[in-house]
Image: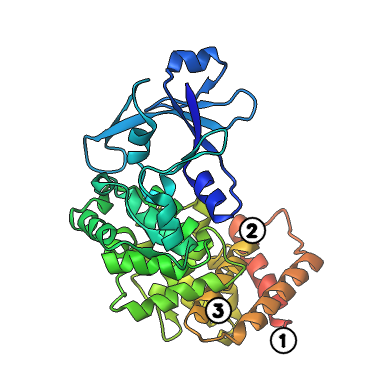
């Protein structure tokens, strides 16, 4: 049995970068031997084990065979006879196909070290085209390593994957995970450019407004807002594509149905889709219209929904390089109303019916709202 550190951890060591994860490949062993050594098996489709003390992942050296479309369409084969070079050959990029033994000796059968020095993202073999997820990974690495260029042959394979309709086999959840990781990298625009130029962006996201590359700048501007993270980055991305002349267009709701997102974010999507334009013009509404808008956003039970929606709408304004002067005033208006609701409680007569109670509460809230200037 021989154990090697592989992948990103080795790449980052060579580049002098910190690395969070350490993955290992085990050559010349078997599942039975790993279990006998107290490693905990966790792999379902192929043998992966957790170290009994460090919990680091150790995978048996393996090869793979394409059996169906998509990134799940593979059969894996493990055997003590599989070499380190064979295992590394199935990896995506040469910079990730480097290994290091316990003595610090580097094993680099696919010249990944040279590609690191030359700042090139290059596929290891033509097996690259069998996994559509690798398109997203290359785009994400371009976002992480801004100064790297993508090898022309690798670009051709990416294009082939897109033209073969392989991107459609990826689940929305998996696409969301990879895109959000890209938004957290140093150069999100680099990721978007790779996806757009290959045609992949148009296949994986409900964006139909992109007519030329310069419009990617609008999407890139979203990464500048530090208050946006995770799904919210994607929320504003989607909103930006459906935003013009200070309004959200009617097709926004249909686009949102295509994305797999959390229930909280989906609720915000739905509210903005149906009532976002009322919220945009909140301060210009009369008091009754404002109160009706609050009811639409379930303000009195969940005030966070309207505040989150307002923040995302403001970021969408900013993404279009149009600063919303009403945003801070609207937030102050909402917070003043929240404070007033906390101070003044509505006394309810228990003998009244439900309709009478609702009418009374509505009247009282309207009076409170009218007292705010």
Label 2 CA crowd tier, 10 Å (few <14, some 14–19, many 20+): few
Snapshot quadrant of residue 102: top right
* Percent coordinates x, y for residue 349 in the rendering: 74, 58
Say above or below: 236 vs 111.
Answer: below
Say above or below: 243 vs 9.
Answer: below
Say above or below: 302 vs 28.
Answer: below
| Residue drawn at 59 percent across, 70 percent down | 294
Residue named by callout 1: 373
Q: Give the CA separation, mark 1 to mark 3.
A: 15 Å
Q: Which of marks 1 and 3 is nearer the N terminus?
A: 3
Residue named by callout 2: 301
* Percent coordinates x, y for residue 341 in the rendering: 74, 68
Residue named by callout 3: 289
Check if mark 2's residue and mark 1's residue have beta carbons within 8 Å: no
Q: Is residue 268 visible?
A: no
Find numbered disc 2 in the image and state the secondary structure of the residue it sits on.
loop
Label 1 CA crowd tier, 10 Å (few <14, some 14–19, many 20+): few
């Amino acid at each position: 049995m021989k154990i090697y550190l592989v992948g990103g951890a080795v790449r980052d060591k060579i580049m002098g970068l910190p690395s969070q994860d350490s993955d290992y490949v085990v050559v010349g062993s078997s599942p039975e031997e790993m279990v006998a050594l107290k490693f905990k098996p966790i792999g379902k489709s192929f043998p992966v084990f957790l170290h009994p003390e460090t919990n680091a992942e150790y995978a048996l050296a393996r090869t793979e065979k394409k059996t169906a479309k998509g990134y799940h369409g593979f059969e894996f084969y493990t055997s003590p006879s599989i070499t380190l070079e064979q295992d590394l050959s199935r990896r995506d990029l040469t910079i990730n196909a480097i290994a290091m033994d316990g003595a610090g000796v580097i094993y680099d059968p696919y010249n990944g070290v040279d590609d690191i020095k030359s700042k090139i993202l290059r596929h290891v073999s033509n097996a690259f085209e069998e996994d559509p997820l690798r398109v997203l990974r290359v785009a994400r690495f371009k976002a992480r390593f801004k100064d790297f260029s993508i090898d022309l042959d690798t670009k051709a394979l990416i294009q082939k994957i897109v033209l073969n309709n392989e991107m459609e086999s990826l689940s929305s959840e998996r696409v969301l995970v990879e895109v959000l990781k890209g938004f957290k990298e140093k150069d999100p625009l680099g990721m978007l450019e790779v996806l757009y130029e290959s045609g992949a962006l148009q296949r994986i996201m409900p964006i139909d407004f992109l007519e030329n590359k310069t419009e990617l700048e609008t999407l890139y501007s979203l990464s500048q807002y530090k208050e946006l993270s995770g799904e919210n980055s994607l929320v504003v991305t989607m909103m930006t594509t459906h935003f013009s002349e200070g309004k959200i267009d009617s097709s926004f709701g249909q686009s949102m149905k295509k994305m797999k997102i959390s229930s909280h974010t989906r609720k915000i999507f739905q509210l903005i889709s149906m009532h976002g334009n009322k919220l945009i013009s909140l301060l210009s509404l009369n008091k009754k219209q404002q109160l009706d808008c609050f009811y639409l956003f379930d303000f009195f039970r969940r005030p966070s929904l309207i505040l989150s929606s307002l923040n995302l709408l403001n970021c969408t304004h900013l993404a279009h390089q149009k600063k919303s002067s009403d945003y801070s005033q609207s937030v102050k208006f909402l917070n003043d109303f929240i404070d007033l609701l906390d101070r003044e409680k509505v006394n309810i007569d228990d003998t009244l019916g439900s309709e009478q109670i609702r009418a009374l509460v509505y009247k009282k809230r309207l009076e409170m709202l009218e007292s705010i200037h």
